Amino acid sequence: MKTNLTVIALLFLLANGTLVVRSSNRNLNSTTPIAAPADVQGNSMTKKTVDAQAQDMAGIEKLHRQDIAATLSRDPVALTNLWTNDAVRLGPGQPAEVGRKAIRETNQRWSALPGFKVLSYVPETKDLTILDGWAVEWGYVTGSYVESPGGEVKQIRGTRLAVLKKLPDRSWKWFRLMGTPLGVLASHVVQGSRPSFGSNAGRQADLAAIEKLHQQDIAATLSRDPVALTDSYTYDAVRLGPIPPAEVGKQVILASNQRQTANKEFKVLNYVPEPKDLTFLDGGWAVEWRQFTGSFIASAGGAPTQVRGTVLIVYKKMPDGSWKGFRGMGVPA
C-alpha cells in the first residue's frame, strides 16, 4: 500500500493540467440557476444569451441521462452513441481508446460478458464550464456491480474529467473523457489503440507556448520544486487523481505539492511525457491527452520504481500569450 500511495502522489505531481474561464464564457455549478440575469462576472445577459444557456444546459443534461441509462443497460449501441466520431476515452490501467470505432468495440466486448450487471451508477457533476460549442466538466462517480449472478457486490467511487462537444443538431456528446466507471469495469477486456493527432495549422505561436509549458513541467517534476510545480496552474485550477477528493484551487494544489515534496530523500529519476493529441477549442482553450513514463526512488539507496500513466489536460491561454491549465487528471497505466 505504501508503494501504491507513493505512485499516486507522483501521478499528482505529473498531472499538470488546468483551465480558466474568460469573461465571455459561462462557468456554472450545481447551485447556479440556469436563467440567471447576469453571468458569473456580473455582466448583463440578454434574453437570447439566457435562452442559449438554457438550451446548452438542457442538451448536456440529456447527455447525462443517456449516459446513466446506457451504463445501467450495458447496451453497446447506446453506450457508443454518447461519443463523437473522433472521441478519446481514457481510463486507469488500460490503453487509450481512440475513435468511436475503438470505443464501440470495447463496449461490445464489455456488454458481452456473461453474468456481469451494473447495479447502480451515479455521476455527480461538481463544475461545468460552457464555451462556444464546447464544455468542460469534472465530478465524482459512484456505482456498484456484480461479475456473475449471485456474486459479490463490488462498489466503485472515482473522479472524472470530460470535454463535451456541441454538434450541429445542438446535441452534446463526449469528445474527451477520463475516469468513467465503464473504463474501470471494462479494463480487463480493452485492446490497444493507435494515437490520433489533430490538425493545428496556423497555431505555431500557441504550439510553441504549450511546448514551453511542457518543458517547464518536466523541469519542475525532476526538481520537485513545489512552487515551480504549482506555477503551471491557473488560480482556479482543479487537479484530479483516480479517486476523490479533487484539489480545487491553486492554493490547495500548492499545499499538496509542498506535502508531497517534503521528503527530501524521494527523488524522481526520469520523467518522459509523450503527447498524443492536442486540439484547440474555442479561442484561447485547448485540450490535450498524453501518456508518460517515469521512475523514482522513495529513499536514498532504494530500488527504483517504474511508473506509467495517462493524463488529460485542458489548457487556457493567458493575456500574455502563455498557456496554463485549469483542469487536469492523471491515472496510472
Image (cartoon, helix red, strand yellow):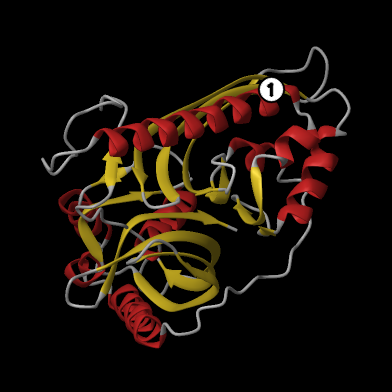
Above or below, comparing residue 126 to residue 133 in the picture: above
Looking at the rendered structure, the secondary structure element under dot 1 is helix
Q: Nearer the viewer, residue 162 or 142?
A: 162
Above or below, comparing residue 145 to residue 268 in the picture: above
Residue 266, position in %: x, y? 33, 68
Report whether residue 245 is seen.
Answer: no
Q: Residue at x 83, y 15 (%)?
A: 149
Q: Is residue 233 left or right of residue 76?
A: left
Q: Nearer the viewer, residue 81 or 224?
A: 81
Q: Is residue 230 left or right of residue 62?
A: left
Q: Is residue 110 left or right of residue 206?
A: right
Q: Residue at x 78, y 47 (%)?
A: 104
Q: Quarter-wise, where is residue 204 in the image? A: bottom left
Mark 1 — residue? 72
Residue 154, position in %: x, y? 64, 23
Q: How many marks?
A: 1
Q: Quarter-wise, where is residue 55 in the image? A: top left
Above or below, comparing residue 304 to residue 174 in the picture: below
Q: Nearer the viewer, residue 269 or 172?
A: 172
Residue 315, position in %: x, y? 35, 64
Which quarter of the image is occupied by the C terminus? bottom right
Question: Residue lying furthest left in this view?
Answer: 42
Question: Residue lying furthest top in this view?
Answer: 150
**Callout 1: few (<14), some (14-19), or many (20+) C-alpha neighbours within 10 Å?**
some
Q: Quarter-wise, where is residue 226 in the image? A: bottom left
Report whether residue 273 is seen.
Answer: yes
Q: Residue at x 18, y 30 (%)?
A: 37
Q: Residue at x 62, y 28 (%)?
A: 66
Residue 73, position in %: x, y? 74, 22
